[in-house]
Image (cartoon, grey):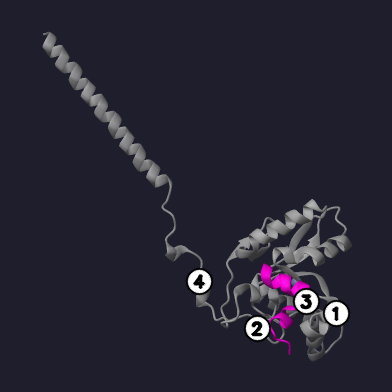
Amino acid sequence: MKRKRLLTFLAAAAVLAFSFLLSLWIDGQIEQRKYPPPPTTAETPMSYAETTLSPWQEWPLILVNRTHAVPDDYVPPLFTLENGQQYDARIYPMWQRMVRAAKKNGFLMEAAYCYRSNETQRQIMDERVAWYRRQGNSQQEAERKAKEYVAEPGHSEHELGLAIDIHAGKNTNAEQLFKWLQANAWRYGFIERYPKDKVEITGIAYERWHYRFVGRDAAKEMKKKHLTLEEYLGQVN
Ligand SMILES: [Zn+2]
């Protein structure tokens, strides 16, 4: 009788141990399903070797102006900011550092206008032409006037995702902010793209708010020698 009780006890213990181990194994299976495996290379962003860039054109130095178009099928890897604006995700760390440095100096700033698709650029151009038409200009005249202010689709740096139109934030004096940026943006790889005294070279009216990422080395040299991107790349027309 005693022996029978011992056997029953052992059998019960074995069943308990088995179900405990089984539950551990099931938990493990669930854990594995909760965390998907890391993405494979096939899911990572597009390779820039696949874009049609000239060999000397590293992505931060792509030249876009009236005579140089955005490369065909160029699609930057976009990052969306809190305000809904987007820019090339690769400039995010440097932009953040610049924002923090500005803040330390008492300036708040916002990336007000960044990436625009070719379509959006076309809409902006069409709206501007329509506005001049309403002022009584001929179609040709309206187009000519619009082009003084709006880059043609395919020729705006904003289509690269590397240009940021900066607005002064709350309680920030715009004059002082832009003065600070002029002196310090190069440290973070950004340049004032359309300086007042370089309109003939850039072909764009003075825009103190338009900053362009070119990378730190290029920005440093351009700042030191007071060069535009066209001059730096030896692409002055
Ligand atoms: Zn701009």
Of the two numbered discs 4 and 3 in the rendering, the one whose residue sits closer to the viewer: 3
Q: Residue 61 location, x and y as percent?
A: 65, 76
Give the distance between the C-alpha atoms of the residues marked 4 and 3, in whole angstroms: 33 Å
**Would you name the residue on which mark 2 appears?**
69
Residues at badges 4 and 1 in contact (C-beta under 8 Å)?
Answer: no
Real-space Cα distance between discs 2 and 3? Answer: 26 Å
Q: Is residue 36 above or below residue 26?
A: below
Element under label 4? loop
Label 2 is placed on what type of residue? Ala
Q: Classify residue 152 as left or right of residue 88.
A: right
**Camera sees residue 115:** no
Let me know if residue 226 is in the magenta part: yes
Q: Residue at x 39, y 42 (%)?
A: 31
Q: Which residues are magenta?
A: 214-237
Q: In the rendered structure, find residue 197 and report the number of the disc placed on it.
A: 1
Amino acid type, residue under disc 1 in the picture: Asp
Distance from label 1 to label 2 (Cα)?
24 Å
Task: Name the amino acid, label 4.
Answer: Ser
**Disc 1 from disc 3: Cα separation:** 14 Å
State which tag comes first along the sequence, 4 or 3.
Answer: 4
Residue highlighted by disc 4 = 47
Q: Please, what secondary structure does the residue beneath circle 1 have? A: helix
Give the label, 2 or 3, closer to the camera: 3
